[in-house]
C-alpha cells in the first residue's frame, strides 16, 4: 500500500510538536542549574529543539499534498483549512527560530565554551512559544477532520446513546 499526501502529513505533524515539548524540561533544567548534569540536559534539549526545527519543514511542505487528498470530501471546510494554513506559517517561522537559537547553543557547547545564558534563555523562550503554536496548529488540523473537536460539539452531542429517542 502506498501512502498518500494526507497520511504523510499526519505522520510528520507529530514530530515538531513532540520534539518541541520534550525539549522544554531539558532547557529549563539547564537554565536553572549550572553544572555538568545541566550541560548534558542542555545538549539534549538543544538537540531536540534543532530536530523540531528541521522536522517542521517537511511537515509544512506536506500540507499541500494533504489538502489535495481531502479537499473534495463532503466534510471538508475551506475556512478551517485556511485557519490551519495561516497558523502553520507562524509555526514554521517560530519553530525554525527556536531551532536556530538552540543551534547557537549547540555551537557554543561544541567549542567547549559555557553557553551564554542569554542564548539558553532565548532557546527556552522561543522553543516554548514554538511548542505552543505547533500544538495549536496540530489542533486546528485535527478540527478539519474531527467534528468532535470543534467548539460547541460537546453541547450539541446527545448526553446518552438514547437521548434522541427519549424526546
Image (cartoon, rainbow, N blue to C red):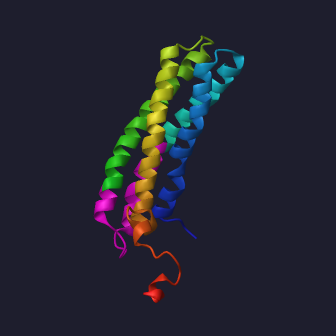
The structure residue drawn at horizontal position 40% and vertical position 41%, both measured from the top left corner, is 92
Relative to residue 15, is residue 53 depicted above or below? above
The mark tally for this picture is 0
Looking at the rendered image, the quarter that the N terminus falls into is: bottom right
The structure residue drawn at horizontal position 46% and vertical position 63%, both measured from the top left corner, is 6
Viewed as shown, does residue 101 lie left or right of 67? right
* 70 part of magenta stretch: yes
Residue 12 appears at what percent x and percent y?
52, 52
Q: Residue at the far top: name it.
A: 113
Residue 55 appears at what percent x and percent y?
51, 43
The structure residue drawn at horizontal position 59% and vertical position 39%, both measured from the top left corner, is 22
Residue 97 appears at what percent x and percent y?
42, 31
Residue 161 in sight in this render: yes
* 18 part of magenta stretch: no
Residue nearer the viewer, 18 or 155: 155
Quadrant of residue 82 within the rendered picture = bottom left
Quadrant of residue 5 within the rendered picture = bottom left
Residue 69 in sight in this render: no
Looking at the rendered image, the quarter that the C terminus falls into is: bottom left
Residue 63 appears at what percent x and percent y?
40, 55
Chain part drawn in magenta: 56-82
Relative to residue 68, is residue 23 depicted above or below? above
Dominant SS type (magenta): helix
Viewed as shown, does residue 22 lie left or right of 135? right
Residue nearer the viewer, 1 or 150: 150
Amino acid at each position: 500500500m502506498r501512502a498518500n499526501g494526507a497520511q504523510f502529513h499526519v505522520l510528520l505533524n507529530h514530530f515538531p510538536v513532540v520534539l518541541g515539548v520534550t525539549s522544554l524540561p531539558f532547557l529549563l533544567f539547564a537554565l536553572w542549574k549550572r553544572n555538568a548534569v545541566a550541560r548534558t540536559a542542555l545538549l539534549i534539549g538543544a538537540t531536540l529543539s534543532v530536530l523540531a526545527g528541521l522536522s517542521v519543514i517537511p511537515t509544512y511542505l506536506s500540507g499541500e499534498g494533504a489538502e489535495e487528498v481531502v479537499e473534495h470530501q463532503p466534510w471538508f471546510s475551506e475556512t478551517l483549512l485556511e485557519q490551519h494554513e495561516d497558523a502553520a506559517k507562524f509555526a514554521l517561522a517560530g519553530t525554525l527560530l527556536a531551532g536556530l537559537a538552540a543551534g547557537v547553543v549547540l555551537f557554543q557547547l561544541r567549542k567547549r565554551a559555557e553557553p551564554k545564558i542569554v542564548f539558553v534563555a532565548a532557546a527556552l523562550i522561543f522553543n516554548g512559544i514554538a511548542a505552543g503554536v505547533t500544538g495549536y496548529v496540530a489542533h486546528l488540523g485535527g478540527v478539519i477532520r474531527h467534528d468532535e473537536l470543534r467548539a460547541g460539539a460537546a453541547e450539541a452531542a446527545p448526553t446518552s446513546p438514547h437521548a434522541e429517542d427519549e424526546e
